[in-house]
Image (cartoon, rainbow, N blue to C red):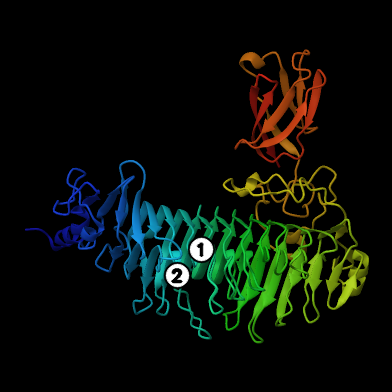
Amino acid sequence: MLKLTTVLLLLLGYHHSFATNYYVSITGSDSNNGTSTSTPWQTISKVNTVNFSPGDNLYFKGGETFPGNIYLSSSDGNSATIIFTISSYGTGRATINAGNSYGISAYNTQGIRIENLILNGSGMSTNTQDGLSFYADLAGNVKLKGLSFDNIEVRNFGKTGVKIGSWNGNTGYENMTLNNLVVYDNLWDGILVYGFIGYNNYVGYPHKNVTITNCVSYNNPGIADPNAIRGNGIVLSNTDGGLIQNCKAYNNGANNVHCGGPGGIWVYDAKGIIIQYNESYSNHSTSTCDGLGFDLDGGSINCIMQYNYSHDNDGGGFLMGQMANGRPWKNNICRYNVSQNDGRHNAAAITLFKEGATTVMDSCFVYNNTVYITPAANNNSEAAFKITTWYTGITNVKVYNNIFVTTGGVPLVDVPSGYSGYFAGNLYWSSGSTFLIKYQGANYNSLSAWRTATNNEMVGSTATGITADPLLTSIGAGGTLNPNPTNTLTAYQLQTGSAAIDSGLNLASTFGMSIGANDYWGDPTLSGSNYDIGADETGSITNFNAPTPAGNLLASNIYPNPVQQQLHIKDDQQLIGSVYTIYDNIGRMILSGRIDAENIAIDMSNFKTGVYLLRLGDNHLTQTFKVIKE
């Protein structure tokens, strides 16, 4: 006779032991059992008649198109730990052709993985639903677990491409991942995670630990609805703990008319969210608000924006602001980001705003960013750093070690009357125009005048801040990096002789702050005798390795000189007159020149840590080498 504990274990493992693989192919038949590739089902209609158990797998044949709409209820999967998977089999991804309705819709269930599929609607003007939708409204503040979405393309839907949310107190999803989603040409939004907002009664969060990585959201234009924000790239809200990383958002929001949103990548009513290594650009709005690049919006607490690249957005590059009725906005950080020509229609490169007379917006830390901004024909209120005139009461604003470069008379700083901030250790450069800072109703045409009048750029009795050309590489020409990662940006690095090098404040010792470990390009945040100003921390080369050349490169003598931060090419006239070219590890040309002597020295002081390829001569002799900087 079996012991009771053994019987219980057998019963608990029952579903997992008898999990089934199901297959669907357009050449199959719904009268088949569907349990092998030789006896597949044929239609989504058949799929919708089956309640799938935890551990089951549902596979659609890759390369084939299946008309219909997949609906999942609480009878499908619904185990937090034993996962039900929907995917493709064979070669390529299967397409779910949703027509005018949804692609996949799920209600009050968990433990589901969806991967390797294409969800296709009939088009923004004809489809009336979301592409991939999960919704929960269970009573009792339930956390549903085990949701993951990977390698899915979602397009041509009349509402939101990927919409995941809940609306019953703090019921929501926990430990959810969205990875490698490509979401585009959807009318309302790209990717949206939302939850119940209990205005004036905020306790807890519906969602917990949400990860969005390697996703691309573009061409989601929104609609002309004055009562709704439409046209967002990626939005994460009502969430405690999360990450948005290595994502791209662009060309969203063109049809939005609502003042307040949309944007490329942003969060609101969120705690402990990190937004990093993303590129957000050319996002739009036809209203007088937003079209932003990145944003820590209303109710954000302990969130960080870092290592991001924002450029050419209609709205601000990096916004931080509070909404009416929001829970307190507190202790948020914007650091080691790059902004190029944001604020083409609204706001400024870095913008703060507050809505609501009694709402709390406290402790905003902005440091080691690099900003470049030129005049915009459709925005006469631009600035490198700006606080919007709206509701006062923004407290403890700290702005340290940033590079602010403007042209054409654009103000470096614009802080209106009734507002304040503390600025220290920044570099200001009005390229080709007069220095201009607007502060509390007065205009200042020199750093010293502003310092004297306001006590900004003073730490105790020590004057800080610099007015100088920062000598940035390829300033204004950062371009678009997509699909390459953000650290492939070759613009905005400090050149040798820059006044920003070793001129920053030590924020840890001076203000007791805990700063990031790396700069925008991944180098340590302290690489020299002192911290640098801006998003780039330069350093001296400590390891510069060029292995002994092989094959037909033996005639050349290639050797590094870490002390002088140079790469030497010495040759007995064999390569004189030919060209050398250096590429980074993803094939981008970094440097090129002509070998005009038997011994040339290539300056490597601006090279970041990484592996490079040296190509010599017309016959493309090649050699790799590695630079390590500390």
Q: Residue at x 72, y 77 (%)?
A: 395
Could you tell me the amino acid type at mark 1? Gly
Question: In this figure, which residue is indicated by the disc labeled 1?
Answer: 242
Residue 193 image point, x, y percent: 47, 67
Check whether the beta carbons of the residues at disc 1 and disc 2 lie within 8 A of each other: yes
Q: Secondary structure at mark 1?
A: strand
In the foreground, 103 or 309:
103
Could you tell me the amino acid type at mark 2? His
In the foreground, 498 or 597:
597
> Badge 1, how many Cα within 10 Å: few under 14, some, many 20+?
many
Left or right, residue 542 beside residue 483: right
Residue 217 image point, x, y percent: 52, 57
Q: Quadrant of the N terminus?
A: bottom left
Q: Residue at x 59, y 48 (%)?
A: 482
Residue sitting farthest toward the front: 125
In the image, residue 30 above or below residue 409: above
Q: Residue at x 36, y 47 (%)?
A: 93
Residue 557 image point, x, y percent: 72, 18
> Badge 2, how many Cα within 10 Å: few under 14, some, many 20+?
many
Question: In this figure, which residue is indicated by the disc labeled 2?
Answer: 207
In the foreground, 109 or 301:
109
Q: Secondary structure at mark 2?
A: strand
Residue 274 picture quarter: bottom right
Badge 1 or badge 2: first in the primary sequence: 2
Residue 15 picture quarter: bottom left
